[in-house]
Amino acid sequence: MKKKREETGDTEKIERMKKKREEAFNKARESHLVVAALIATVTFAAAFTLPGGYKSDQGTAILAKKAAFIVFLISDAISMVLSISAVFIHFLLAFYQSSIKETTLPDETTWKLFDRATLLTMIGMGTMIIAFITGTYAVLEPVLGLAISICLIGLSFFFLACGIIYNDLRDDIC
């Protein structure tokens, strides 16, 4: 009799742990979706509010021939496409999870999709920072000291990200 109670208690404990894992996964997925959607929104808006503005007579970008401006447009477009791809994967994930509702924990396919969406979002963040740096540089190029300062501040994102990743890897190895 006592053994059955212990088994029932263990089963309930396992079910609670599974439920917590599922809730944590869903919260992470929701926050990743919000981040990817925000990146898509910001990069879309940046494409139409171009640094330097437009030529009033032709409607073309004033800085269109500057290398920094071209890099801005390319990195902005890459960031938008990557973040929209991540949003799309999150939608696929929602459909996929609803089709396999008999299991409560995410399966291997769910984790692969989630990992890909996370990677796309992270790369999208990086290219968004590049767009910020190059767009700012294109506008501030006449004031070179300020332009370089802003570039260095923007690049600090990559130093911070690399430091965080390095520390995580070092902690996992040691």
Image (spheres, grey):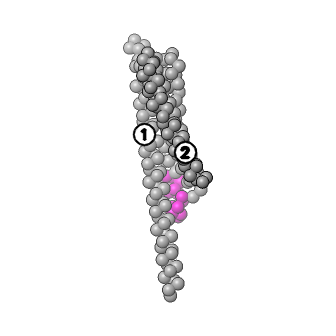
Q: Which residue is mark 1?
A: 38
- Earlier residue among tags 2 and 1: 1
Asked if disc 2 and disc 1 are in contact, CB closer than 8 Å, the reply is no
Q: Is residue 3 above or below residue 32?
A: below
Residue pushed farthest bottom? 1
Across the whole image, how many numbered discs are drawn on residues? 2
Front residue of 26/147: it is: 147
Q: Position of residue 11 (x, y in %)?
A: 51, 74
Identify the residue shown where x is 60% and y is 54%.
Answer: 174
Front residue of 161/97: it is: 161
* Secondary structure of the residue carrying numbered label 2: helix
Identify the residue shown where x is 44% and y is 54%.
Answer: 27
Residue 117 appears anywhere in the view: no
Q: Which residues are magenta?
A: 94-106
How crowded pointer 1 is (Cα within 10 Å; few <14, some 14-19, many 20+) is rated as some
Q: Which residue is mark 2?
A: 165
Q: Amino acid at mark 2?
A: Ile
Q: Is residue 122 above or below residue 53?
A: below
**Apparent side of residue 129 relative to residue 173 in the rendered image (left or right):** left
Q: Amino acid at mark 1?
A: Leu
Front residue of 167/89: it is: 167
Residue pushed farthest top? 57
